[in-house]
Image (cartoon, grey):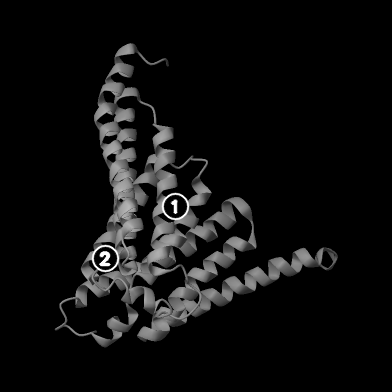
C-alpha cells in the first residue's frame, strides 16, 4: 500500500528533532577525538574511548527510536537507520576491545594491565554499562525481526559481548573481596552471572546457527569457545556442578565436531 502524503509529512516532521540530535552527537565525537589527539597524557585514552562508546550507544538508541517512529507513522521499518545502528554496535565492540582487550582463550587475568588503566571505572558503573548495552543490542535485534537477513550475524555480536563482559570483570578483585562486607559484593556477583549467562546464550546461538543454517563446524567451535570460557571461570571460582556440566557439554560438542570433520575428510569410508 502506497504511503499517503500525510504519513510521509508526519514522518519527516518527527525526523527533524532526531536528526538535530544526531548532529549534536557528531559534534561531540569530533570534540572527544580532538581532545584525545591533543592530550599528551596517554593514561586518559581509555576514558576518551569510553566517552566515544557512550556517544555511539546514544546514536544506536536514537536510530532505534527513529525506526519506532517510522513504524507508527508509516508502518514501515527505517532500514537505513537500523543498519546505521547495527554498524555502530560493531564500532562500540571494537572500541571496547581497545579498552579491555578481546582475549577469550587465555587466563582470566591476561588483561590485567588494561584493567588497571581503567581503575576509576568502579564495578557498579561497569555492570550498568554492560546491562544497558546488552539491552540496546537486544532491542535492535528485536527491531529487525525474526526474518531479518542479518539473523545469523547476531551470534557474532553476542560472542563479542560475552567476551567484553568477561574482560571488563576483575576476577582478582572478585576472589580477593568475595565477602558480604564488601560494598560491591552483590554487584560483582551480578556481573559474574551476566558473563556466564551471555556465554551460555551465545554457545546456544551458535549451535542453533549450525543446526538451522550453516552446518559448519566452525560455528560449533565458536560454541565450544564460549563454553571453554565458562569452564575456566568455574574452575577458578570452584563451582563444581557447573564445571562438570560444562566439561561434559564441551566433550560432546568436540566429539560431534571430530565425527563431522572425519566424515568430510573420508567420504568413501562413510559410504562403506
Percent of width and height locating residue 197: 37, 66
Query: What residue do we see at 40% from left, 61% from top?
Result: 161
Percent of width and height locating residue 4: 35, 13
SS for callout 2: helix
SS for callout 1: helix
Question: Which residue is more in the foreground, 69 or 117?
Answer: 117
Image quadrant occupied by the N terminus: top left
* Mark before the other along the chain sequence, 2 or 1: 1
Look at the image and tell me whether residue 216 can be seen: yes
- Within 10 Å of disc 1 (Cα), the crowding (few <14, some 14-19, many 20+) is some
Query: What residue do we see at 27% from left, 20% from top?
Result: 10
User: What residue did someone put label 2 on?
Assistant: 127
Q: Establish if 114 lies above or below 98.
A: below
Query: What residue do we see at 34% from left, 59% from top?
Result: 49
User: What residue did someone put label 1 on?
Assistant: 90
Look at the image and tell me whether residue 144 can be seen: no
Percent of width and height locating residue 112: 38, 79
Amino acid at each position: 500500500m502506497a504511503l499517503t502524503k500525510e504519513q510521509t509529512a508526519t514522518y519527516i516532521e518527527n525526523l527533524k528533532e532526531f536528526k538535530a540530535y544526531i548532529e549534536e552527537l557528531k559534534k561531540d565525537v569530533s570534540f572527544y577525538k580532538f581532545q584525545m589527539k591533543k592530550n599528551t597524557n596517554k593514561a586518559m585514552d581509555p576514558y576518551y574511548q569510553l566517552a566515544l562508546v557512550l556517544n555511539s550507544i546514544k546514536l544506536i538508541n536514537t536510530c532505534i527510536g527513529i525506526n519506532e517512529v517510522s513504524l507508527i507513522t508509516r508502518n514501515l521499518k527505517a532500514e537505513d537507520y537500523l543498519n546505521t545502528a547495527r554498524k555502530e554496535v560493531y564500532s562500540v565492540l571494537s572500541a571496547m576491545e581497545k579498552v579491555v582487550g578481546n582475549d577469550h582463550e587465555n587466563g582470566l587475568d591476561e588483561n590485567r594491565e588494561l584493567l588497571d588503566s581503567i581503575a576509576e571505572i568502579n564495578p557498579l558503573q561497569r555492570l550498568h554499562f554492560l546491562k544497558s548495552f546488552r539491552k540496546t543490542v537486544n532491542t535492535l535485534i528485536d527491531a529487525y525481526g525474526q526474518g531479518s537477513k542479518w539473523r545469523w550475524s547476531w551470534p557474532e555480536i553476542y560472542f563479542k559481548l560475552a567476551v567484553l563482559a568477561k574482560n571488563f570483570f576483575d576476577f582478582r578483585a572478585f576472589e580477593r573481596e568475595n565477602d558480604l562486607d564488601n560494598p560491591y559484593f552483590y554487584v560483582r556477583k551480578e556481573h559474574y552471572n551476566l558473563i556466564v549467562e551471555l556465554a551460555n546464550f551465545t554457545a546456544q546461538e551458535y549451535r542453533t546457527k549450525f543446526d538451522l543454517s550453516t552446518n559448519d563446524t566452525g560455528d560449533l567451535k565458536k560454541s565450544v569457545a564460549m563454553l571453554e570460557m565458562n569452564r575456566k571461570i568455574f574452575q577458578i571460582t570452584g563451582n563444581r556442578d557447573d564445571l562438570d556440566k560444562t566439561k561434559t557439554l564441551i566433550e560432546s560438542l568436540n566429539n560431534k565436531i571430530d565425527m563431522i570433520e572425519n566424515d568430510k575428510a573420508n567420504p568413501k569410508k562413510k559410504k562403506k
